[in-house]
Image (cartoon, helix red, strand yellow):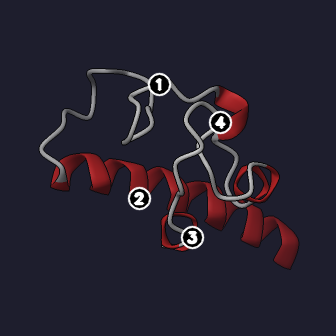
């Protein structure tokens, strides 16, 4: 039960943080529909949006430009 709560919490938290960061950055929630790297503006693949696992797999870097991603973005 705790594992399910953890998984749902990380997915929901990741989604809410993405929306929050778009709003604070003055971006639209609807356009573009896909997330992109803040540094190179490359669209992020769907399998790179899995919280924590993707961050660890990519070693905290963008797949395209290797720009460092803050660990705070996956834990907020």
Q: Quadrant of residue 56?
A: bottom right
Query: Where residue 44 sits in the image (x, y, percent)?
Result: 56, 29
Ranked by sequence position, the earlier of labels 4 and 3 is: 4
The residue under label 4 is: 63
Q: Residue 71 carries which label?
A: 3
Ranked by sequence position, the earlier of labels 2 and 4 is: 2
Query: Where residue 27 sits in the image (x, y, percent)?
Result: 18, 37
Q: Residue 17 carries which label?
A: 2
Question: How many residues crowd around disc 2 within 10 Å: few (fewer than 14), some, or many (20 or more)?
Answer: some
Label 3 to label 1: alpha-carbon separation: 19 Å
Q: Which of 67 and 55 is in front in this view?
A: 67
Label 2 to label 4: alpha-carbon separation: 20 Å
Q: Residue at 27% x, 25% y: name it.
A: 30
Q: Is mark 4 on a helix, strand or loop?
A: loop
Q: Which mark is residue 42?
A: 1
Q: Is mark 3 on a helix, strand or loop?
A: loop
Q: Label 4 near label 2: C-beta < 8 Å?
A: no
Question: How many residues crowd around disc 3 within 10 Å: few (fewer than 14), some, or many (20 or more)?
Answer: few
Q: Label 1 near label 4: C-beta < 8 Å?
A: yes
Ranked by sequence position, the earlier of labels 2 and 3 is: 2
Query: Where residue 12 sits in the image (x, y, percent)?
Result: 55, 57
């Amino acid at each position: 039960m705790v594992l399910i709560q953890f998984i749902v919490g990380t997915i929901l938290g990741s989604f809410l943080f993405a929306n929050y960061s778009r709003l604070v950055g003055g971006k639209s929630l609807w356009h573009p529909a896909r997330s992109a790297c803040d540094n190179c503006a490359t669209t992020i693949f769907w399998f790179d949006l899995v919280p924590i696992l993707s961050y660890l797999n990519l070693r905290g870097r963008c797949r395209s430009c290797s720009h460092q991603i803050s660990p705070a973005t996956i834990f907020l």
